[in-house]
Amino acid sequence: MTVDLVVKGGRVVTSKSTFKGAIAVDHGKIVGIMSNATAPSADRVIDAEGLFVLPGIVDAHVHFREPGFEYKEDFATGSAAAVFGGVTSVCDMPNVNPATQDAASFRLKLQRGLKKSLVDFGIFGVVLPSNLEKISELKQAGVVGYKIFMGETVGNLPSPDDWDLYVSFKEIAETGLRVGVHAENRSMTTHLASELKSKARNDPLALLEARPSISEAEAIQRAVLLASPFGTKLHIHHTSSKEGLEVIRRSRAMGASLTAETCPHYLLIDGVKYLKEKGSLVKMYPPVRGIEHSSALWRGLREGLIDMIASDHSPHSLEEKSGDNVWEVIAGWPGVETSLPLMLNEANNRRLTLNEIVLYMSEGPARVWGFYPKKGALNLKSDGDLTIVDMKKEHTIESEGLHSKNRFTPFEGWKIKGMPVYTIVRGNVLLERGEFCSGTHEAQLIVPGRSVCS
């Protein structure tokens, strides 16, 4: 038998083991995991000697900004950045224009993604006070899950009140899908920001005072409580604080169906220091906090309280990120390209293992959003998504070297060790030895429930 692709000579990494071996991919699926000596002949063979072969990285929290905000990013540029970052699948957020709030807006985004994206993608549907009756319709359209913005965020979509949350959690439970929440108490943060503005506090550190960790913890607690009568599958996006993590701990101990994510910036950046040094460039919602919070989040990973690491890739124009008044600068920055390299560097620093990177950045997101083992696994009949990394390759993160439409990063100048060198989506090699490969690859929509490999 001759297959489309064989990757041999490298060390294969799963969440539980690492071993020398070969992987065969044919017609987009993994058809063999074997010793190098027994690998079949192939139309293309990749020699991965000295490299590590991971299941394709899944970034389950990106904002590719299309439709409506293509001046910030679009599916073409966002997915190109993903490819260079070793990411083979993404889940895209719904705060676009029009917001992804019904079947028509879902189809509009889907058409753009299928036309432009290089990587496979899922699409979140937003839950607003005005579209509660569209929850089932979004499920039928093919959303990967739902997103609720409990706090003020980019796009300024209205937050559901407590009754709307209660009703929406009931409706979502009936779909069987999971809902993720941006957990901040909007009333609290709005009041605190107004108070700080009245005192002419426009400095970057005012952001931390306007969005305290208690705001996140309260919102998580409220979401858990309102979802509990229905057993709604609940996810906490971009967990940022030790207090929020403690609520997650208690809620899980009480049996809540609850998953959580965090992001590299919450793990790696001292928000107090960086806001002082870099100013509003480091503005993010929720804010990046002090090192006591990052230390707690690392413990949360080790204890299994956090299920995934995602980028919250949220690009804007440089003009939107510039200025001395923190309230006038927009929140967010590109991250899909730097996420994996940053965590590979931490693996080299022995803060986590490659097996844990697979758990948090491949398997975890695929399990949470319902498309494991089609994605996030190196199993027979899983999609042939592979991320091959060179743990000895050194690199300096530079804004101008990124591939997003708008290029800036708070990690500017960071020297790291460990880089993705091959990105393979369903057997299609999109990145080879760190260089982009053009071809005829077409992206596919990821739909939960189609997790049984076929």
Image: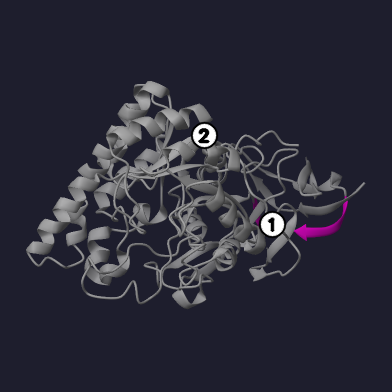
Q: Nearest the camera: 122 or 246?
A: 122
Q: Earlier in the sequence, mark 2 or mark 1?
A: 2
Residue sitting at x 51%, y 57%: 340
Look at the image and tell me whether residue 442 can be seen. yes
- The image quadrant of residue 181 is top left
In the rendered image, the vertical position of residue 156 relative to residue 352, given as above or below: below
Question: Percent from the top left, x then y, of residue 362?
Answer: 57, 45
Q: Quadrant of the C terminus?
A: top right
In the rendered image, the vertical position of residue 250 relative to residue 58, given as above or below: above
Task: Please tell me whether residue 6 belongs to the stretch shown in magenta.
Answer: no
The amino acid pointed to by label 1 is: Ile
Separation of residues labelled 2 and 1 (CA atoms):
28 Å
Q: Nearest the camera: 20 or 242?
A: 242
Q: Which residues are magenta?
A: 41-53
Q: Is residue 174 left or right of residue 50?
A: left
In the rendered image, the vertical position of residue 34 relative to residue 276, given as above or below: above
Q: Is residue 328 left or right of residue 87?
A: left
Look at the image and tell me whether residue 389 can be seen. no
Question: Percent from the top left, x then y, of residue 60?
Answer: 51, 48
Residue topped by disc 1: 424
Residue sitting at x 20%, y 50%: 189
Task: Please tell me whether residue 51 belongs to the stretch shown in magenta.
Answer: yes
Q: Residues within 10 Å of mark 2 (few under 14, many from 20)?
A: many
Residue sitting at x 60%, y 54%: 110
Q: Residue furthest right?
A: 1
The amino acid pointed to by label 2 is: Leu
Closer to the eye: label 2 or 1: 2
Question: Percent from the top left, x then y, of residue 196?
Answer: 11, 60
Residue 177, numbered label: 2
Q: Nearest the camera: 376 or 89?
A: 89
